[in-house]
Image: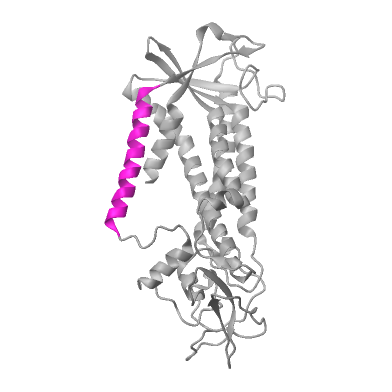
C-alpha cells in the first residue's frame, strides 16, 4: 500500500505541468519575468489511475481475506469486539497499569498523579518524530546543495539567476528576481518520464511518508483524550463519528490543514516545466527555487517542533494512559456499555479494584494499592 500511496502522490504532482509561454518569457540581469500556461500530460494521469485502482484492489482483497469484527474506527469498539469474539483476553491484576507497563508483570500498584507521555509509551511515535526532524535536516541540506550548485556551476552570464538575498526572497516565485537552478531531463517519451519520477520520488517520497506517519501521533493522542473522558461528568461514549474529531480536535485540525499546505509548498520549491508544440513534449525541465525550499524547511521545522511538544506532554490524573492500545484497554475496561465511567469500584484488603461501569464512579484513592477484583498470589507492590 505504501508504494501505491507514493505513486499516487508522485503522479498527481506530475500531471499538471507548468509550461512557459514563449511570448511572455524575458530574461535579463535585472529582472526575470515569465507567465505560464498549464499542460496536462497523459502518462502521469494513467499512472495515477493505476495507483488508485491498486489501492482499491488491495483494500477489497483485505476485506475478503479476513473476518470484519467491526467497521468502527474507535479503539474501544475494536477492543470490545476482540474481547467478545475471544480474540483478545484481558490480563488480571492490571487495573492500574498503563500501556508503558506492558513489560511489567501483573502486580499491585498505587495510582500515579501523572501518566507517561506518548513519547515514552509508544516506540513507533519516537520513530515518527525522529523522521520528521530528519526531513527538516534533509530539506536544509537540499537548499544548501541548490545554493552550492548555483554558485559553483552556473556561469557568470547575463541569464544567470540572481543571488539569494532579502530582495530576492519571496513566498511565491512569480514576477520577481529569485534564485534557482534548472536542468533538462534527457531522453524521450517513457525514458524521460522514468527519470522525472525518479527525480520527484527522491525528494517527495520521504516527505509524503513522514507526513502520512504523523497521523499516527494525532490518532493515539485523540484516542487518549477520548479515553480520559471516562473520568468526566458525561463519561466516555465508545462510539463516535470518525469525521467529528477532524474539526473539533485542535491537533487533528492542524494536521488536516498542514499536510496539503506543506505539499503545496513543496510544489512551489520543485517545479516540473515543459516545452510543448503541437500536443507533443519537446523537453521536460526540473526547476528548484532556493527561497521556496528554505520556506518549506522553516515550515517543516515549525511542524516538527509542534509535534515534538505534543508527544512530550504528560496527561494528568490517576487514570492509566492507554493511547488506544487494545490490550491495555482490555485490561482496564471490565464492563462495556455505550457510555462508560472509570474509577474506584471495590475496596479490599490488602488491594482495591478500579474499573469501569455504566454509571459514574468515585475517584480512586491515591494512597491505596490497586490490583484487581480477583486477587490471588501477587507480586510485591511496585
Q: Position of residue 304 (x, y in %)?
A: 61, 47
Residue 246's place in the image compared with 4, above or below, is below
From this viewpoint, is residue 378 visible? yes
Total numbered labels: 0
Secondary structure mostly seen in magenta is helix
The stretch of residues the image draws in magenta is: 41-66
Q: Quadrant of residue 2?
A: top left
Left or right, 273 with reference to 116:
left
Q: How is the image coloured?
A: one colour
Q: Quadrant of residue 196?
A: top left
Left or right, 147 with reference to 77:
right
Residue 262's place in the image compared with 178, above or below, is below
Left or right, 167 with reference to 221:
right
Identify which residue, 210 or 61, lies in the foreground: 61
From this viewpoint, is residue 194 visible? no
- The residue drawn where x is 41% and y is 41% is 5
Question: Most extreme residue toward the top, as rendered?
Answer: 23
Identify which residue, 302 or 361, lies in the foreground: 361
- The residue drawn where x is 55% and y is 52% is 244
Q: Is residue 47 magenta?
A: yes
Q: Is residue 311 magenta?
A: no
Identify which residue, 130 or 36, lies in the foreground: 36
Question: Most extreme residue toward the bottom, as rendered?
Answer: 349
Residue 211's place in the image compared with 20, above or below, is below
Q: Position of residue 103 (x, y in %)?
A: 48, 73
Identify which residue, 258 or 194, lies in the foreground: 258
Q: Quadrant of residue 161?
A: top right
Amino acid at each position: 500500500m505504501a508504494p501505491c500511496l507514493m505513486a499516487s502522490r508522485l503522479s498527481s504532482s506530475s500531471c499538471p505541468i507548468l509550461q512557459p509561454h514563449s511570448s511572455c518569457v524575458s530574461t535579463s540581469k535585472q529582472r526575470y519575468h515569465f507567465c505560464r500556461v498549464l499542460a496536462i500530460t497523459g502518462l502521469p494521469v494513467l499512472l495515477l489511475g493505476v495507483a488508485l485502482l491498486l489501492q482499491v484492489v488491495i483494500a477489497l482483497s483485505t476485506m475478503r481475506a479476513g473476518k470484519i469484527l467491526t467497521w468502527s474506527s474507535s479503539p474501544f469498539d475494536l477492543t470490545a469486539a476482540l474481547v467478545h469474539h475471544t480474540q483478545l483476553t484481558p490480563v488480571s491484576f492490571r487495573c492500574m497499569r498503563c500501556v508503558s507497563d506492558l513489560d511489567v508483570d501483573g502486580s499491585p500498584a498505587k495510582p500515579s498523579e501523572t501518566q507517561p507521555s506518548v513519547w515514552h509509551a509508544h516506540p513507533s511515535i519516537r520513530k515518527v518524530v525522529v523522521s520528521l526532524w530528519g526531513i527538516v535536516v534533509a530539506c536544509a541540506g537540499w537548499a544548501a546543495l541548490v545554493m552550492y550548485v548555483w554558485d559553483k556551476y552556473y556561469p557568470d552570464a547575463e541569464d544567470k539567476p540572481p543571488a539569494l538575498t532579502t530582495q530576492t526572497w519571496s513566498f511565491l516565485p512569480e514576477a520577481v528576481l529569485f534564485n534557482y537552478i534548472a536542468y533538462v531531463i534527457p531522453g524521450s517519451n517513457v525514458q524521460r518520464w522514468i527519470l522525472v519520477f525518479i527525480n520527484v520520488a527522491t525528494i517527495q517520497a520521504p516527505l509524503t511518508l513522514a507526513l502520512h506517519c504523523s497521523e499516527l501521533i494525532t490518532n493515539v493522542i485523540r484516542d487518549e483524550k477520548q479515553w480520559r473522558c471516562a473520568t468526566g461528568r458525561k463519561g466516555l461514549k465508545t462510539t463516535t463519528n470518525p469525521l467529528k474529531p477532524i474539526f473539533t480536535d485542535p491537533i487533528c485540525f492542524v494536521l488536516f490543514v498542514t499536510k496539503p499546505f506543506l505539499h503545496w509548498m513543496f510544489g512551489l520549491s520543485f517545479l516540473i516545466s515543459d516545452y510543448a508544440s503541437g500536443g507533443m513534449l519537446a523537453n521536460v525541465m526540473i526547476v528548484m527555487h532556493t527561497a521556496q525550499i528554505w520556506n518549506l524547511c522553516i515550515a517543516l521545522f515549525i511542524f516538527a517542533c509542534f509535534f515534538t511538544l505534543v508527544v512530550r506532554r504528560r496527561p494528568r490524573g490517576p487514570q492509566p494512559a492507554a493511547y488506544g492500545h487494545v490490550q491495555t484497554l482490555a485490561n482496564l475496561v471490565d464492563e462495556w456499555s455505550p457510555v462508560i465511567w472509570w474509577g474506584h469500584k471495590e475496596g479490599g484488603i490488602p488491594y482495591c479494584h478500579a474499573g469501569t461501569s455504566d454509571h459514574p464512579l468515585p475517584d480512586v484513592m491515591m494512597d491505596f494499592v490497586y490490583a484487581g477484583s480477583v486477587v490471588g498470589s501477587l507480586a510485591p507492590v511496585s
